[in-house]
Amino acid sequence: MSTYLIGDVHGCYDELQSLLAQVAFDPTQDTLWLTGDLVARGPGSLEVLRYVRSLGDAVRLVLGNHDLHLLAVYAGISRNKPKDRLTPLLEAEDADELINWLRRQPLLQVDEEKKLVMAHAGITPQWDLETAKVCAREVEAVLSSDSYPLFLDAMYGDMPNNWTPELTGLSRLRFSTNALTRMRYCFPNGQLDMISKETPESAPPPLKPWFAIEGPVARDYTIVFGHWASLEGKGTPPGVIGLDTGCCWGGVLTMLRWDDQSWFAQPSNRERPLDE
Ligand SMILES: Nc1ncnc2c1ncn2[C@@H]1O[C@H](COP(=O)(O)OP(=O)(O)O)[C@@H](O)[C@H]1O
């Protein structure tokens, strides 16, 4: 009975299966945590969703920005970009079921026994765990309701970028979604910068990666995140673990076995990275 955590799969179905085969993953015994961005960019988004959904209670995942974008594309709100390679999924006979399952998945996972927290982008240093839970549940509630297209339509955009408990309505939902699924850099006061994508060595001052600004959650919990492939899993402080190592860009798919902290990697099948 082991717990495995895997970074952004991004449609890399074959690599996911090979990685799980390395440890003889058994969904009747083991649990799989996934950092989100299950879909887009890689060739097998449809197969990934079908497989992950079939795992039932053996999987604990969080939604990423590309998963949310897929929901918006399927709802006719956003454009299907060819480089996302989502068309087979959008046209699949079981697309309705898959999309309705996906939009009912969480944006935050917390395991009190393991003292483990997972969100696709991370946890903003402006939040304590209670606030993170409340804000994630608010987004999850609207996504699983019938009015989810209204939220998806209002989700895009970078503002507001500063947390205050007074935020309400769609602005509050947009802040929470950006913090949980798109954040990389923050200003020293924890305000989000939604523009920079550089590696930390070339980050424009005074911006710092969110995990370099002390926040209350990191004091008591290990935080696991994906989203930021150019980190290549490096540069985080102890207790913060970045699992996205860019499999869909020709990197590797990375897995951590929680129980003994052993690492596994599956190289991308891709010969050359995709053009952006
Ligand atoms: N709230 C949001 N605002 C802007 N883009 C969003 C939002 N939510 C999801 N997205 C989607 O996230 C994706 C971002 O892609 P990209 O800019 O290449 O960054 P990444 O490095 O995360 O792949 C796009 O498909 C975009 O439509």
Image: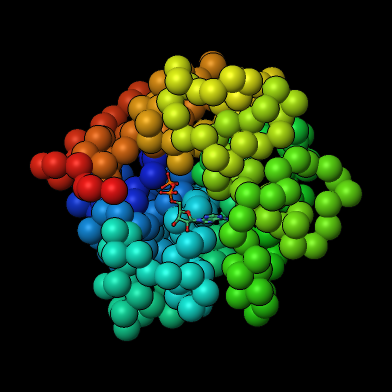
Where residue 188 appears, x then y in whole percent?
Answer: 70, 22
- Dividing the picture into quadrants, the one containing residue 180 is top right
Task: Report the side of 10 relative to 150 (left or right).
Answer: left
Task: Report the side of 133 relative to 237 (left or right).
Answer: right
Q: Nearer the viewer, residue 71 or 110?
A: 71
Where residue 271 appears, x then y in whole percent?
Answer: 11, 42
Quarter holding the N terminus is top left
Task: Report the side of 30 relative to 62 (left or right).
Answer: left
For the point 58% across and 31% down, which residue is it?
185
Where residue 14 appears, x then y in whole percent?
Answer: 20, 52
Count numbered badges in the picture. 0
Q: Is residue 21 at all visible to an observer of this figure?
A: no
User: From this viewpoint, which residue is outermost toward the bottom?
Assistant: 93
Q: Nearer the viewer, residue 21 or 268?
A: 268
Task: Report the side of 52 relative to 13 (left or right).
Answer: right
Q: Is residue 206 at all visible to an observer of this figure?
A: yes
- Dividing the picture into quadrants, the one containing residue 260 is top left
- Depicted 213 relative to depicted 109: above or below: above
